[in-house]
Image (cartoon, grey):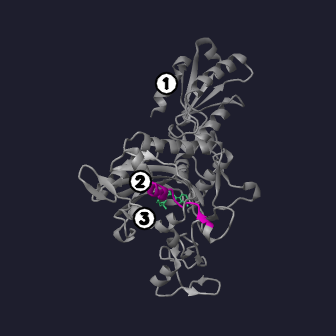
Amino acid sequence: MANNENHLMDSIVSLCKRRGFIFQSSEIYGGLSGFWDYGPLGCELKKNIRESWWRNTVQKREDVVGLDASIIMHPRIWEASGHLAGFADPMVDCLECKKRYKADNLCEEQGQKLIKTDKGFALPEGIKCTACGSKAMTEPKAFNLMFRTFVGPVEDETSVAYLRPETAQAIFAQFSNVLSVSRQKVPFGIAQIGKAFRNEINPRNFTFRSREFEQMELEFFVKPGTDKHWHHYWVEERLKWYHSIGLSADSLEKYVYKKDELAHYASACVDIMFKFPFGLQELEGVAARSDFDLSRHQQFSGKSMEYFDQDTNEKFIPHVVEPSAGVDRIALALLCNAYREEWIPKDESMGGVIEAEPGKPVPENYEARTVLKFSPRIAPFKAAVFPLLKNKPELVEKARKIFDTLNNRWPCFYDHTSAIGRRYRRQDEIGTPYGITIDFQTITDNTVTLRDRDTMKQERISADKLTDKLQELLAD
Ligand code: GAP
């Protein structure tokens, strides 16, 4: 990471803690690597992400239904899915670029053999990262990314279970039940939001790669042969959703998998990538996974996963297109996308706002502000209400009345402490799009000032028109 990007990431992490978006888990005990807690504002932000996704992916559609499955499931599920065998290889990580390899594959590619030692495995001399060329690699570790636990009072091999490493498998395991109760016909989808757990070797980049995280996954079941059409459809739908929550087209990129990068059963995969300060990284994968998952569950459970198409009298195992996104990564992308440091001239004749230069002192006659330019859709609070002075009962009474009316409709914030400028700055820093100030003029003509977070411009409007005005502004 270049210096500026480092500074940017440090500033975002610091704001997240200072303002209550994200805290280190178990901080009072020194923290636990790869685990994070979302504070009062962080949980509102995540809730808005989930709600927007659910509304868009499930409720607004007639062809998708929801599921909320248990985190711990029968261990055979992970045999069928391939997670039990697939995650158990010795792994090595490049300490420079953090790319992870299966140790034996990496050695073979470089004409060498992984060394077996009495403690496990070791890399032969000279093995390097094929991505960046560094020879600084971690020791090989036989590693299954799934967290193991025991079900019931006896801790032996017969009671071993796993915390799910993805939400998707429960959808496949419940495919027949959901199909029979929902009266859906292929093509249709089952969606789920929930926690997933991976014992990542190298949790890093703040919340980007965590050990406990949340996924929003859709399994969209289609007729074999229509995979390509639906895959294209879902990539475009998912991009539209990202734009709707404020991630512009130029902050995102698609990574289209080449044939030799695809899993043997997959026909296509596109990752939706975001330009984080630490580089272009995956937010979501959209994969066409054929009938692999349902067929494996049919094979392992002995239960049929076939679908009977009444229109054509055909029986088939549906293929699946899977858009799979991470709530925590999206929250981090939204925070990075929204974060700005600005210098504001004290006198308007000096020109407009300028972007702050990292590490440089604030120029004379300018003041600094930090602002999160969240889309109103995902901002934790939609508006803040301020009585100009807290010791004037007529202002306070009016402000409380306005706050109660607005807060009944949208999450709003009431603040009567400190100077009005400081109150504006505090709301800018947490991304509240609008500020409403009740001042002495309000008492005489029932008007208030409405301040726009991004332009900092204020207009006077009648208090009676506030709800309609905000309705119009927040519908954006
Ligand atoms: N069912 C497919 C699946 O789980 P994945 O690419 O492994 O695919 C999907 O994960 C999404 O889950 C990722 O795009 C990312 O947003 C999120 N995710 C995966 N591992 C994560 C981790 N360790 N920390 C945070 N988010 C993660």
476 vs 450, left or right, is left
Residue contact at pointers 1 and 2, CB within 8 angstroms: no
Tell me, yes or no, if residue 238 can be seen here. Answer: no
Between circles 2 and 3, the one closer to the viewer is 3
Q: Which residues are magenta?
A: 159-175
Based on the displayed image, in which of its 4 quarters is residue 426 positioned?
A: top right
Q: Which residue is mark 3?
A: 302
The mark nearer the N terminus, 2 or 3, is 2
* Placement of 416 over or under 198, stated as above or below: above
Q: Circle 2 — which element?
A: helix
Q: Residue 385 appears at what percent x and percent y?
A: 62, 27
Q: Residue at x 72, y 30 (%)?
A: 417
Q: What crowding class fits label 1: few (fewer than 14 Cα within 10 Å), some (14-19), or many (20 or more)? A: some
* Numbered circle sitting on residue 469: 1
Q: Is disc 3 placed on a helix, strand or loop?
A: loop
Residue, x 55% and y 69% (percent of image)?
98
Residue linked to disc 2: 176
Quadrant location of residue 319? bottom left
* Quadrant including the C terminus: top left
Q: Is residue 300 magenta?
A: no
